[in-house]
Image: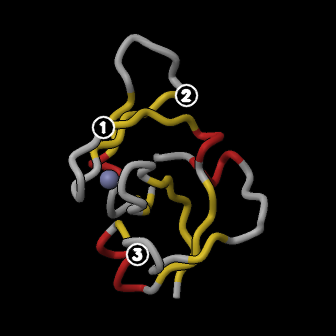
Amino acid sequence: MAISMGVLCEKCGTLHLINSATKNRVDRLPRTDSNLFVLRCMACLAVRSFSRGDLRAYLVSDEYYARGFAKRGQYQLQPIQVKSRAASCS
Ligand SMILES: [Zn+2]
C-alpha cells in the first residue's frame, strides 16, 4: 500500500494521484495563478481545475499508485495533514 496526494474527479469519482508517475497528466495553467492545475479525467473525459489546497492524502494499493488513478471504492482518504511541499508536482 502507498499513500499519495490526489484529487477526485467530481463527475465520476475517480481518484487521480499526483505523483512522479502521473505528473505528466496534470498541466499547470499557463499565464494564470500558478497554484491552479488542470486535470483531464481519462475515465469520463471531464476536465477540471484544482489548486494545491484541493489535494488530499489517499491510501491506495501499489498497483493503483503506479497506474496513477483508482476508481470509487479503491482508495481511502487519510486524515493526515500533508505539508504543501509534499503536494508539489515537481
Ligand atoms: Zn471523471
In this view, the mark in front (1 or 2): 1
> What residue appears at the point 41 percent right and 51 percent down from the top-left corner?
9
How crowded pointer 3 is (Cα within 10 Å; few <14, some 14-19, many 20+) is rated as many
**Badge 2, how many Cα within 10 Å: few under 14, some, many 20+?**
few
Callout 3 amino acid: Tyr
Q: Residue at x 35, y 67 (%)?
A: 69
Mark 2 highlights which residue?
35
Residue extending furthest toward the front:
11
Q: Position of residue 45 (x, y in %)?
A: 21, 46
Q: CA distance from mark 3 to mark 2?
A: 23 Å
- Of the residues shown, which amino acid type is indicated by label 1? Val
**Mark 1 and mark 2: Cα distance apart in space:** 17 Å
Query: Percent position (x, y) of residue 37?
Result: 43, 33
- Which mark, by number, is residue 65? 3
Number of on-image labels: 3
Residue at label 1?
47
